[in-house]
Amino acid sequence: MTAPRAAQRAELEGARTRHADYQVPAGTYLQIELRTNLSSNSSAAGDPVDGRLLLPLTSEGKELVPAGATLLGSVREVEPAGKKQRGRLVFTFHVVEHPETGSHATIKGTVLTFASPDPKKGNVYPELKLEKGLDLSISLLAPLTVRIPRAK
């Protein structure tokens, strides 16, 4: 292939690639605000869980996902509180949604497990309640690839 043709081909390939891929490495912590009320006595496995990213995700000095992005997840396990039984909630987040583009990226993060405190009197454990606004933190277990459109 001649030099002019190689240059044209490279230019065409560059025009087709309208995005750049960046990676947020495994082990990165995500600070999240819980936006769903959860309870050991009324939540069920499979219930949706929503969160909001409190700090942006960055890589190579570039903001990839801004603060305010929505995180979507689900309840995995629930044990109601009761006599001689601690209330327990287990949930995780699966997806991060970019607030400006609406694009979704699958995430694999640590699982969050909460249990009710010891009973104050007797042997009846109190209901475990996680309220909207609770600050949470998860760690990415696998890298997150984010595709950013290139400037034209």
Image (cartoon, helix red, strand yellow):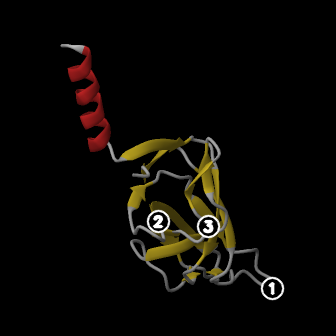
Q: Which mark is residue 121?
A: 1
Where's residue 31, x and y in %? Answer: 66, 62
Which residue lies under the disc numbered 2? 98
What's the CA distance linking mark 3 and mark 1? 42 Å
Give, as a three-letter code, the residue at label 1.
Answer: Lys
Total tally of numbered discs in the picture: 3
Residue 25 visible here: yes
Helix, strand or loop under label 3:
loop
Dot 3 and dot 1 residues touching (CB under 8 Å):
no
Reply above or below: 11 against 140: above
**Circle 2: is it few (<14), some (14-19), or many (20+) Cα within 10 Å?**
some
Of callouts 2 and 3, the N-terminal one: 3
Reply above or below: 116 against 146: below
What's the CA distance linking mark 1 and mark 2? 46 Å
Of callouts 3 and 1, the N-terminal one: 3
Give, as a three-letter code, the residue at label 3.
Answer: Ala
Q: 38 or 144, which is in the foreground?
A: 144
Of callouts 1 and 2, the N-terminal one: 2
Could you tell whether 151 is left or right of 4 in the image? right
What's the CA distance linking mark 2 and mark 3? 9 Å
Q: Which of marks 1 and 2 is in front?
A: 2
Q: Which mark is residue 67?
A: 3
Q: 144 or 130, which is in the foreground?
A: 144
Helix, strand or loop under label 2:
loop
Where's residue 120, x and y in %? Answer: 81, 83
Say which residue appears at 24% left-offset and 29% top-offset: 8
Q: Nearer the viewer, mark 3 or mark 1?
A: 3
Say which residue appears at 64% left-offset and 73% top-offset: 33
Reply above or below: 120 against 24: below
Where's residue 9, x and y in %? Answer: 23, 28
